[in-house]
């Protein structure tokens, strides 16, 4: 375990932005984590896969890369398997491991960038499935006291791209492992998302396996979302806003094509990508940064972009969406 001074964070954030950390340390075990925290008096930034951050400046403190490894079966019943996974495991590696073992439940979450430890922070979700549906518990270390605490599903207070770790418990814990309950048989397949149904049909698959669904999701993601290894990005930059049903109905009179998903009796969720596209941003470039050409919800860094330029672009997008639709977009990405 080595402390690096003035470390470049470029390879540790999927936007590929250049920023420096005063100190940087990578921990591979819980013991290393405890040691790193015990001796630290600096401001702390914990990184998983760096797939949900926008670095706008150098970080004047300690950046801790959580690389705690390991996949361990901790329980089993006729139908289910309970698996404890180290926070540093790459999310998609775990998805592939599950599929290879015929464990169902996370196939719709294929190819999401980031690590297992970061997944509960924002209750990752895609194609009709959210992490909370397969979540059993997580273990975390309290940064101040170095005490371990297990969080149940209720305690995590999961919501749409939300958890207690973005609110009440923000900055207080480092997640060390996440335990999942997956199915060994009688998989509960979720093919409700339109694009999945289409791809399965195109591929001539009538009775999909979890692997078929994973492959379909991979195909859809690869066609719409830029690969961060090729073009810097952090997935959806904004959350899809939820608006009042009455406001939705009023807007619908003016914009009959406006998509919307009912989330409760009085609320409708509107795709931010659609709103941003309607404001003319899709595919727009500003020097080395821009809005992705296939999915307007994704801001990109083509190479030498700067975090502040992306931040300014996000502000301009947000303002134009307010001006046109009266809807306030909120970022999904964390600004540093
Ligand atoms: N749309 C447009 N223009 C665009 C993009 C989207 O009109 O440029 C429209 C689509 O035609 C469709 C609707 O918006 O009618 C929804 O689009 P899509 O299926 O691509 O999903 P999304 O709502 O834009 C969300 C998640 C993604 C997740 C997909 C699939 C959020 C903020 N984003 O995007 O998550 O992969 O659904 O479930 O909820 C992420 O969080 O980083 C992420 C990629």
Image: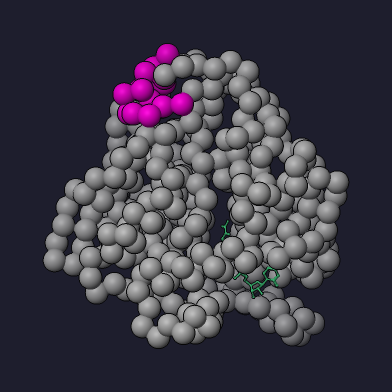
User: What residue is at 62 percent from the left and 49 percent from the top?
Assistant: 228
Magenta segment includes 34: yes
Please tell me in which quadrant of the rendered image residue 78 appears.
Answer: bottom left
Describe residue 209's horizontal placement relative to residue 332 as left or right.
left
Q: In this view, does 114 lie above or below 160?
A: above
Range shown magenta: 26-39
Q: In the rendered view, how is the structure colored?
A: one colour
Magenta segment includes 161: no
Q: Which quarter of the rendered picture does the C terminus lie within?
A: top right
Q: Which quarter of the rendered picture does the N terminus lie within?
A: top left
Q: Is residue 34 above or below residue 271?
A: above
Describe residue 289's horizontal placement relative to residue 298 as left or right.
right
Count of labels shown? 0
State whether residue 107 appears in this view: yes
Picture coordinates of residue 251, whole percent (x, y) = 74, 78
Q: Identify which residue, 33 or 43, lies in the foreground.
A: 33
Picture coordinates of residue 284, whole percent (x, y) = 83, 58
User: What residue is at 35 percent from the left and 74 percent from the top?
Assistant: 209
User: What residue is at 61 percent from the left and 22 percent from the top?
Assistant: 7
Q: Is residue 65 above or below residue 90?
A: above
Please tell me in which quadrant of the rendered image residue 277 appears.
Answer: bottom right
User: What residue is at 31 percent from the left and 40 percent from the top?
Assistant: 70
């Amino acid at each position: 375990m080595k402390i690096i001074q003035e470390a470049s964070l470029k390879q540790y954030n999927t936007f590929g932005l250049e920023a420096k950390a005063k100190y940087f340390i990578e921990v591979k075990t819980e013991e290393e984590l405890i040691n790193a925290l015990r001796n630290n008096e600096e401001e702390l930034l914990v990184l998983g896969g760096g797939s949900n951050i926008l670095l706008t400046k150098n970080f004047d403190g300690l950046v801790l890369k959580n690389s705690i490894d390991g996949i361990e079966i901790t329980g089993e019943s006729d139908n289910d398997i309970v698996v404890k996974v180290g926070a540093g495991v790459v999310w998609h590696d775990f998805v592939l491991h599950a599929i290879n073992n015929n464990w169902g439940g996370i196939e719709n979450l294929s190819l999401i960038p980031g690590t297992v430890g970061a997944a509960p922070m924002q209750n990752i979700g895609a194609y009709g499935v959210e992490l909370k549906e397969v979540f059993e518990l997580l273990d975390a270390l309290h940064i101040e006291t170095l005490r371990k605490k297990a969080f149940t599903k209720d305690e995590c207070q999961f919501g749409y791209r939300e958890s207690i770790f973005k609110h009440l418990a923000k900055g207080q814990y480092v997640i060390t492992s996440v335990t999942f309950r997956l199915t060994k048989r009688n998989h509960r397949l979720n093919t409700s998302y339109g694009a999945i149904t289409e791809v399965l049909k195109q591929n001539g698959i009538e009775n999909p396996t979890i692997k078929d669904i994973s492959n379909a999701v991979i195909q859809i993601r690869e066609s719409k979302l830029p690969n961060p290894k090729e073009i810097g990005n952090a997935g959806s930059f904004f959350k899809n806003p939820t608006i009042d049903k009455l406001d939705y109905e009023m807007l619908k009179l003016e914009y009959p094509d406006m998509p919307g998903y009912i989330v409760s009796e009085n609320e409708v969720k509107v795709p931010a990508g659609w709103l941003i596209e309607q404001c003319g941003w899709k595919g727009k470039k500003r020097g080395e940064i821009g809005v992705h050409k296939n999915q307007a919800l994704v801001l990109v860094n083509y190479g030498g972009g700067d975090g502040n330029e992306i931040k300014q672009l996000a502000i301009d997008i947000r303002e134009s969406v307010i001006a046109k639709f009266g809807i306030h977009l909120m970022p999904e990405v964390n600004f540093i």
